[in-house]
Image: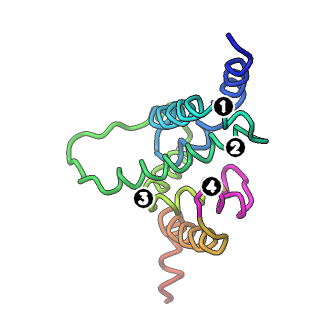
Amino acid sequence: MDPSERGFEELFRDEYSTIVRCVAPIVGSVSEAEAVVQEAFAKAFDRWRRVSRYDRPGAWVRRVAIRDAVRSAQRERRRPVDDGPTASPDRSALVDGQLELIEALRTLPARQRTAIVLHHLADWPVAEVADALGCAEPTVRVHLHRGRAALALLLIPETEELLDGP
C-alpha cells in the first residue's frame, strides 16, 4: 500500500462517523447518511491525488457529502407520498423529543433543514454553512429564519395561537 492510500484510510477513519452524524438529520436516516458519505469518500478517492494536497481534505469530503445530502433530500421531498406502512426509527433507542425533532426536520425544505442542522446541531458558524451550501451568508440566515419559524409551529403548539393573536 502506498503512502497516499494510507493517508486516505486515515482520513476515512478520522472523519467518517463525524460526517455521517452531520448528514443523517439532513437525509432523515443513518443508513441513507452512510450511503451518501460513502459516495463522497468514493469521490475523494477517485480524486485523491488532488484532494490529498488540500489543507483540510476532510472538509472537502464533508462539503461533498452535505451537498449530495441536500440533493437527496430535495429528490425525496418531490417523490409522491405512499399511503402504505412507513418505516419508523427504533423508538426504544430514541427519546420522544428527538423523534419529534427528526420528524419536524423532515418536513422542512432541504436547504432549510441543512442550515438548521449545520448551524444549530453541528454548531457551525453561518459562514461555514454558506460555504457548504454554496450560497451567500444572508441566504443562510433566511433559511435559518424560515426553518426556525416552521419548526416552532410544528414543535410548539401554542406558537400558532400566539402568532394569530387573541
Give the label, 1 or 2, closer to the camera: 1
Mark pair 2, 4: CA separation: 9 Å
Amino acid at circle 4: Ala
Q: Secondary structure at mark 2?
A: helix
**Residue with the mark numbered 1:** 49
Identified at 66% across, 51% down, the residue is 121
What residue type is disc 2 on? Ala
Q: Are marks 2 and 4 in contact (CB under 8 Å)?
A: no
Q: Amino acid at mark 1?
A: Arg
Q: Which residue is mark 2?
A: 59
Alpha carbon distance from label 3 to label 1: 39 Å
Q: Which x, y percent locates residue 14?
A: 72, 28
Q: Secondary structure at mark 1?
A: helix
Q: For residue 107, which numbered disc appears in the image?
A: 3
Q: Specify the quadrant of the image occupied by residue 6.
A: top right
Q: Nearer the viewer, mark 3 or mark 2?
A: 2
Give the vertical position of 95 relative to 12 (above or below). below
Q: Read off the residue under disc 4.
A: 132
Q: Is the N terminus in the top left, top right, bottom left or bottom right quadrant?
A: top right
Q: Cα distance, mark 4 to mark 1?
A: 22 Å
Q: Nearer the viewer, residue 42 or 29?
A: 42
Point out the residue furthest to the right here. Answer: 55
Q: Residue at x 35, y 52 (%)?
A: 75
